[in-house]
Amino acid sequence: MMIGVSEAASEKIVEILSSANAQNSFLRIGVEEGGCSGLSYTLIADEQKTEGDILLNKGEFSLLVHTNSIQYIEGLQIDYEERGMIGGFTLNNPNAKASCGCGASFRMENYRGEVKKCD
């Protein structure tokens, strides 16, 4: 299982997890149905490792990925960009056939997911 994390994204993840008020927080990366392209990424701080999770140690922090999401995000590259007053994580997914303008939703060549209006 390969997920790349840039230095800028690593620094932001460490900052987020240290402010999560949890001793052993992980960044959980996943995929769920929805979004304007059919599948949406999820990035959340999580303290619970569950059965079916894969733990990826990235040095100062660890990522959790459930086995159900691997087929959608294998090879994902996570970056963080500061842009004026807003900044955010950018996700470059080699498996995505199409992505929406905001970059939070995508679809695969062989699976479209369930298209829903973005929040």
Image (spheres, rainbow, N blue to C red):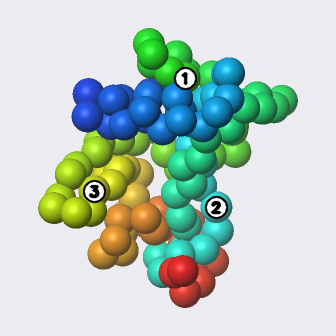
Residue under pointer 2: 32
Pointer 2 with pointer 3, Cβ within 8 A: no
Task: Name the element at disc 1.
Answer: strand
Task: Name the element at disc 2.
Answer: strand
Q: Residue furthest right?
A: 51
Question: In the rendered view, would you say 48 is above or below 78?
Answer: above
Residue at image x 33%, y 55%?
88
Tell which of 94 and 35 is nearer to you. Answer: 35
Q: Dividing the picture into quarters, in which one does residue 10 lie?
A: top left
In 3D space, how far apart are the residues under numbered discs 1 and 2 (Cα atoms)?
21 Å
Residue under pointer 3: 87
In 3D space, how far apart are the residues under numbered discs 1 and 3 (Cα atoms)?
22 Å
Tell which of 52 and 94 is nearer to you. Answer: 52
Numbered mark located on residue 83 in the image: none
Q: Amino acid at mark 3?
A: Gly
Closer to the chain start, of discs 1 and 2, is 2
